Structures are given as C-alpha cells and as structure tokens.
C-alpha cells in the first residue's frame, strides 16, 4: 500500500492511518524544547561548582527522563512526517514554525552530553562515550543542515515584512554553538594527534559560525522591539532565546580551553585559556543585562494576562546555558562571584523547568496542547514577487 495517496490534482492526502492519530498532525518541532529544557537541568547541575547532597543522583534521574522524552518526541515527530506529510511540509514553509526545526539538533546534542556527563554513572564510561558520539554526530549534522536550510527558506520561500524579526530566528543558528560547547567532551576520548586537534578546531569553527550569524540577527531583533514595541503576550517568553547563544558561547570557549592543552601546541593552548576569560566575562555581562530586560518584559506580559504556551520552555535551556557558562568562568577565574551566579541561575532554571513541565502535563492531559494551535499573532508578510 502506498504511504501517501494523491487526489486527481496530484495533491498529497493524509496517510490512511492519520485519522487514528489526529493529535500528531499539529505536533511541531517545538516539542523538542521539552527534551532540551530537561537535559540541561542534568548537565547544568553536574557543572555547578558547589557540592549539594543528592544533586548528582537527581541529575542522573533527570538525564534518564530527558532520554525517554527524546525517544518519545522523536517517535512522535517521525509519525507526524509519515502520517501528516502535508502538514510537515507546511511547517517548513511557515516562517513562524520553520526556525524550530533547529531544536531537534539541540535535543540530540543535549541528551548526548548528559549521557557522558552524568549518564556514565548508570551506563559505564565506554557505553556513555559511544552514545554521546552517535548523538553528537547526528545532532551536529542536523544542526549544520538547519543552519543553512532554514535561512535559505527564509530568503527564497518565506515572505516577511520589515520589522517582523523574532527571537526564534536564532534557533537554527545556535545549534552549531551547542555542538561547539558539547563537542569538547569527546576530545579527550580521541587518541592524541590529528583526530583530536581536528575535532577541537571543528568545534571552534562552529563557535565562530554560530557567533557571527547571531551577530547578524540580534540587531534585527532589537530593532524590531524598539520600532514595533513589545512582542505579543504569547511570544514574550521567546525573548529568553537570546540568552542561548550568549550562554552557550561562553560555555563553549571555557570547555574548549579545558581540553586545548592535550590537543594543540602550548602557545595555542594558553591562548584558548586567555580567550575563555576575555570573551566570556563581557558576554556574560551582556547576558545578565538581557536576562533583566527579558524578565521585566515577562512580568509586564503576566500582568496583562499572558497564559501558558509551549513558548514557556524558552525559560529553560537558554538559562541553563548561562549556568554552564558561569560555572566555566568560575573554573578559569577562581572567583566566588561566578560560583554564586551559577547557583542563582540554576535555581531559576529549576523553577522554570518545574513550572513549564507541570503546565505542559496539564495541557496534555487536558487535551489543549495536541489541538490545532491558534495563531500567536498575525504575521505581516511582504507581497509575493510577481511571477
């Protein structure tokens, strides 16, 4: 039996089994944010520069939950593509949804990193390294594809009016930065020589790729806020997405500095360490500025009746990257201030994760989340080019 049927005009119809699983039709790529937001709780907790009784065991439990979530969401998304291919293609062509395709890469990378950081307590180091290597490879390839494909679609297929920039545009661009931040975990697992150095420098290249792309998009986002005013209430949590490339890039330079001495010659290894501090400190300062601005906008939106949507998961992973970034700076500077900053941000992360998780479960059991989503805002589109 053919998987897809066609009507007389050649348009794809739904799979014959689609009516049995209608909830999958509107299951978008944004659901991978639940995996990312859960996995970062485990890895950020393990990175904390302070000892808390029971924290390690809790991180292992949360990592296991993130692995289960990855399996569930990946299976559901595969079912979405098989049973509702027309809707899946529509998501790619929808400028409000397409950027979320970068979340799959980050979910794979986050769970892979968690497997090596805390999952090794359960699986053993050899198995944890193997799992992380597979997920890192798959996540990196998916992230690089998204970093090219989504901007390509934005240019040639999406029609966006000036002033319609959104923080979600950063999602496919920050995926290679996640690879740059978690890739160093695998560098010591390679034998000294070409392979180890190549992986280190590849991570450094992805750091630059993502950073420069972010520097192109971030001014557009701020210009949209200044000239058009606050985001619609439901989209306000996406302001936290800007913290992603900031915190993740700080994490990346510190992680790269940790493994550089065994991968590159001494002059370059010491330069990696110096750059981790010279880059990380000012970027962390800007991240805190943006966190304060975003928090003020969220408070404003809550006072005006902002309800729960899946965008609330934007409060989790980006904040988690700032935790790991602050922890990295604490290692390389020795300052207690960064220790306490990492702890304070982790408390914020745990709170956001708990709230988003409870509200998501409530939406699933209440039947509101699998339903067709309502438009978050009318998308201003530029006129289509003349044929």
Image (cartoon, helix red, strand yellow):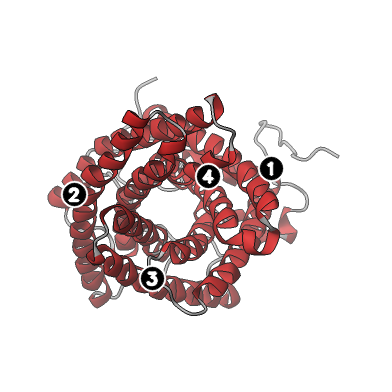
- Which residue is tagged 2? 282
Residue at the (29%, 75%) spot, across then down: 305
- As helix, strand or loop, the secondary structure at mark 2 comes to helix
The reply to whether discs 1 and 4 touch (Cβ–Cβ < 8 Å) is no
The reply to whether discs 1 and 3 touch (Cβ–Cβ < 8 Å) is no
Label whose residue precedes the other's in the sequence (1 or 4) = 1
- As helix, strand or loop, the secondary structure at mark 1 comes to loop
**Camera-nearest label, 1 or 4:** 4
Mark 4 to mark 2: distance in Å? 28 Å
Q: Position of residue 202 (x, y in %)?
A: 46, 30
- As helix, strand or loop, the secondary structure at mark 3 comes to loop
Between 15 and 261, the one lying in front of the other is 261
- Which residue is tagged 3? 50
**Camera-nearest label, 3 or 4:** 3
The correct choice, above or below, for 148 with respect to 121 in the image is above
Q: Position of residue 290 (x, y in %)?
A: 21, 57
Label whose residue precedes the other's in the sequence (1 or 2) = 1
The N terminus appears in which quarter of the rendering? top right
Q: What is the crowding at mark 2: few (fewer than 14 residues within 10 Å), some, or many (at least 20)?
A: few
> On residue 13, which mark appears?
1
């Amino acid at each position: 039996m053919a998987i897809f049927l066609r009507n007389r005009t050649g348009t794809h119809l739904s799979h014959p089994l689609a009516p049995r699983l209608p909830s999958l039709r509107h299951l978008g790529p944004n659901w991978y944010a639940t995996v990312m937001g859960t996995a970062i709780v485990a890895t950020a907790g393990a990175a904390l520069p302070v000892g808390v009784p029971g924290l390690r065991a809790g991180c292992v439990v949360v990592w296991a939950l993130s692995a289960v979530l990855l399996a569930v969401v990946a299976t559901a998304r595969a079912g979405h593509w098989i049973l509702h291919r027309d809707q899946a293609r529509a998501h790619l062509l929808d400028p409000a949804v397409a950027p979320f395709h970068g979340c799959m890469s980050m979910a794979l990378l986050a769970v892979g990193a968690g497997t090596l950081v805390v999952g090794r307590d359960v699986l053993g180091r050899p198995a944890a390294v193997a799992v992380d290597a597979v997920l890192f490879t798959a996540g990196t390839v998916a992230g690089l594809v998204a970093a090219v494909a989504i901007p390509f679609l934005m240019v040639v297929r999406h029609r966006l009016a000036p002033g319609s920039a959104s923080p979600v545009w950063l999602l496919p661009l920050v995926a290679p930065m996640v690879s740059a931040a978690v890739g160093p975990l695998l560098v010591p697992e390679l034998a000294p020589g070409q392979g180890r150095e190549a992986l280190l420098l590849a991570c450094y290249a992805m750091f630059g790729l993502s950073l420069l792309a972010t520097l192109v998009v971030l001014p557009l986002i701020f210009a949209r806020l200044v000239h058009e005013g606050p985001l619609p209430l439901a989209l306000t949590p996406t302001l936290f997405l800007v913290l992603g490339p900031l915190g993740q890039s700080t994490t990346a330079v510190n992680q790269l500095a940790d493994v550089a001495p065994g991968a590159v010659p001494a002059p370059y290894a010491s330069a990696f360490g110096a750059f981790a501090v010279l880059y990380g400190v000012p970027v962390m300062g800007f991240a805190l500025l943006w966190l304060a601005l975003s928090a003020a906008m969220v408070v404003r939106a809550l006072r005006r009746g902002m309800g729960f949507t899946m965008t609330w998961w934007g409060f989790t992973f980006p904040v988690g990257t700032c935790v790991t970034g602050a922890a990295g700076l604490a290692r390389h500077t020795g300052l207690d201030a960064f220790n306490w900053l990492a702890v304070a941000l982790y408390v914020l992360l745990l709170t956001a994760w708990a709230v988003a998780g409870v509200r998501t479960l409530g939406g699933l059991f209440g039947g509101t989340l699998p339903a067709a989503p309502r438009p978050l805002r009318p998308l201003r589109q530029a006129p289509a080019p003349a044929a």
